[in-house]
Image (spheres, rainbow, N blue to C red):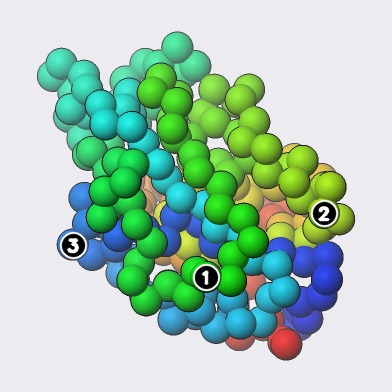
Amino acid sequence: MTDFTPGPTDALIVIDMQNDFCPGGALAVPDGDACVAPINRLIGQFEHVILTQDWHPAGHSSFASAHEGGAPFGLTEAPYGPQVLWPDHCVQGTPGAAFHKDLAWTKAELVIRKGFRPAIDSYSAFQENDKQTPTGLAGYLKERGLTRLFMAGLATDFCVGWSAIDGCSNGFDVVLLEDASRAIDLDGSLAAAKDAMAAAGVVFSTSDAIAA
Ligand code: VGL
Ligand code: ZN
């Protein structure tokens, strides 16, 4: 295992550690809250901590409830391509959209909100699902001179995976911390996401490899 010592050009990116993705939430990721403890330790180790927050308006186009006959976890054809339909989740300002109560989030220097455009979903922290609309994160990181990104959070096969891949395509070194992430795993989506991450150049590691 490679040892990673966080330095001034490294950032920890914590993806969507929100109530709705944790047990009891509207789109609960199995064991999702098990990420909180390792992530809190990581937050203590990194100088730069960035969070993402899934942040949908009520009636968002990714919600099954917004489509006649739409079933959660089914597919729809969005103008930008196939889009999974989800239960209503992370509605702006609701308790489900808040960070997990035990997450040590106060140190974060930036919170990137995503999925706020009614017609476009956004898994990646870098760009929305239309693959065209940037969130501004790449520009922020570049302007700040942050070059290596350690990612953790929910869910490995959607928001974490897409963020990791887009991090690589934006020229960053990306390390996925697997024990600090959990997957939804719809129809093999975890295996597919891991293959896609490996092909993109994402390095797989665990939080105990972080030496600080
Ligand atoms: C996510 C589905 C819908 C995620 C967000 O955080 O992985 N998944 N919205
Ligand atoms: Zn969402």
Residue at image mark 2: 144
Q: Residue at x 64, y 31 (%)?
A: 134
Residue at image mark 3: 24
Q: How many marks?
A: 3
**Alpha-carbon distance for marks 2 and 3?**
37 Å
Question: Where is residue 120 drawn, in percent x and y?
Answer: 45, 24
For marks 2 and 1 on the same chain, the one whose residue lies earlier in the sequence? 1
Q: Is residue 210 above or below residue 19?
A: below
Residue 209's mark?
none
**Alpha-carbon distance for marks 2 and 1?**
20 Å
User: Does residue 74 appear in the picture of this structure?
Assistant: no
Label 3 is placed on what type of residue? Answer: Gly
Nearest-to-viewer mark from 2 and 1: 1
Q: Residues within 10 Å of mark 2 (few under 14, many from 20)?
A: few
Q: Using the rendered view, name the quadrant where residue 91 is placed.
A: top left
> Which secondary structure, mark 2?
helix
Q: Using the rendered view, name the quadrant where residue 204 is placed.
A: bottom right
Specify the quadrant that holds the N terminus.
bottom right
Q: Is residue 153 above or below residue 44?
A: above
Residue at image mark 1: 106
Q: Is residue 135 above or below residue 143?
A: above
Looking at the image, residue 96 sits to the left or right of residue 7; the answer is left
User: Does residue 16 appear in the picture of this structure?
Assistant: yes
Q: Which is nearer the eye, 166 or 125?
A: 125
Looking at the image, residue 70 sits to the left or right of residue 121; the answer is left
For marks 2 and 3 on the same chain, the one whose residue lies earlier in the sequence? 3
